[in-house]
Image: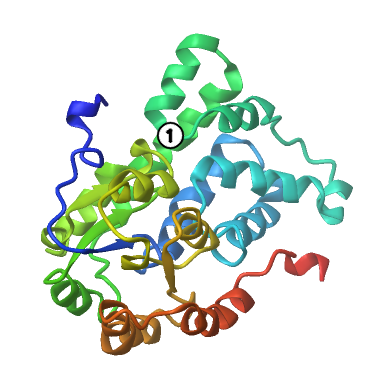
Amino acid sequence: MTDSHNPLKNFLKKHDYLIAIDSDGCAFDSMEIKHKECFIPNIIKYFNVQPISRFVRTSAEFVNLYSKWRGINRFPALVKTFDLLKDWEEVQRRNAKMPDLEPLREWIKRETKLGNPTLKKEIEKTNNSVLKLVLIWSEAVNRTIEEMVYGIPPFPFVRETLESVSQWADILVCSQTPEEALRREWAEHNIAQYANVIAGQEMGSKKEHIAIVANGRYDKDKIIMIGDAFGDLDAARANSAYFYPINPGDEDKSWEQFFKTAAELFRKGKYDKDYESKLLEDFFKRLPETPPWKR
């Protein structure tokens, strides 16, 4: 994508405040169905790990839904899933053959725009068989999501929040979901109209999304990221922005609190680090680092 066609760099500021919002698991209750019905079955199918399928499922669910890695890009998540499996004693006893994802790991270190388009370019350069398999899996995931994931509305109070804050803040959808899926989901439920920009994995990391849009346009204390994962918190911290957590398992209550209380505190300059810290105490407890089979 050239700069002349980059909606992040060509962003037109309308208000003094910027609210960045994650999509899957944050605005939409779509994390569970996407991972349990789309990502994981395709991992088992394409990486030939049928003999340890129940362990693969448990590991992938922990990484993507119930841990500090929740919400990370699909490619690092795939690597982490197999890293945990290789270190799992019960899996080791089964002598299961697992893929060597070292080429994927190395590509992840070099690339920030972790999506199928950049993966295809890497394959064109290297002709690497591992990366080819990963691309086949990733494209299958996208097809399954398109076939299966529809009719899932935003969490309660998301629409009300967007209607309200869009009157005084610019809104950036900031996600690692492919852009096509993001646009389809936000348009399906008639809330795309509230977003100034919808940015997916093809436009870079969430940290980069915020940095490009915010650069020279907003005061640091007038930027906030709403998210349900540590990656969202990291993106906020990297840009000296505030963070508002949507607690996994308690999303309705989190959105209601933002709509009724936190949004107005932010607008009035009263959303401070003390208020944020109290919210983060509960958030941290919900996303552990140690998997349950090691506790």
Amino acid type shown at disc 1 = Lys
Going by the image, does 47 lie left or right of 156? Answer: right
The percent position of residue 171, horizontal first and vertical second, equals: 22, 60
Q: Nearer the viewer, residue 58 or 153?
A: 153
The answer to whether residue 121 is above or below residue 269 is above
What is the quadrant of the N terminus in the image?
Answer: top left
The answer to which quarter of the image holds residue 189 is bottom left
Q: Nearer the viewer, residue 232 or 251?
A: 232
Going by the image, does 43 lie left or right of 173? Answer: right
Residue at point 13% right, 74% down?
163
Q: Could one spot residue 221 in this view of the protein?
A: yes
The answer to whether residue 265 is above or below residue 93 is below
The percent position of residue 216, horizontal first and vertical second, equals: 29, 48
Residue at point 18% right, 27% down?
4
Residue at point 40% right, 44% down?
208
Q: Which residue is mark 1?
A: 113
Within-10-Å neighbours for mark 1: few <14, some 14–19, many 20+: some
The answer to which quarter of the image holds residue 142 is top left
